Image: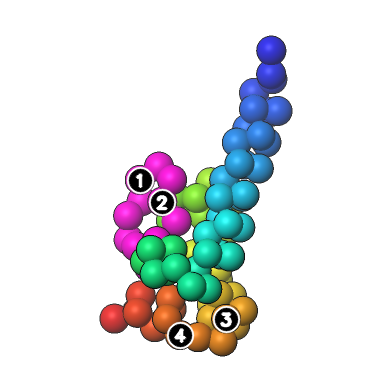
Amino acid sequence: MLSRDRLEKACKRLWHAVLEQAIKDARWDVTAQAWFRSKDQGTGSFLWICAVLDLSPEFIRRLLVIKYNEEVIYETYRH
């Protein structure tokens, strides 16, 4: 049986992997781009994952702009 701590770490690894894949997908996939812009806070949403991983959504969005040299995610979210 997994301890609570080990289970929490495993869940965080899973959500980290989801975020990593979404970052890769955001380069070309408009659905992934929309996921980063969404204001949804439900389980599995970008904002929810950021909360679980204790990450700043704004920071992640800015990193995407730098990584892909595009404003497609950040600029659209601000409007």
Predominant SS of the magenta segment: loop
Q: Earlier in the sequence, mark 4 or mark 2?
A: 2
Report, in whole angstroms, how far the alpha carbon at label 4 lies from the one at label 2.
Answer: 21 Å
What label sits on residue 45 in the rendered view?
Answer: 2
Mark 4 secondary-structure assignment: loop
Residue annotated with mark 3: 68
Residue annotated with mark 1: 42
List x then y, in percent, for residue 47: 43, 56
Q: At 43% across and 76% down in the image, what residue appears?
A: 73
Mark 1 secondary-structure assignment: loop
Which residue type does callout 1 highlight?
Gly
- Front-most of residues 64 and 28: 28
Report, in whole angstroms, how far the alpha carbon at label 2 lies from the one at label 3.
Answer: 21 Å
Side of 20 where 27 appears, left or right:
left
Which residue type does callout 4 highlight?
Glu
Q: At 50% across and 86% down in the image, what residue appears?
A: 70
Magenta stretch bounds: 35-46
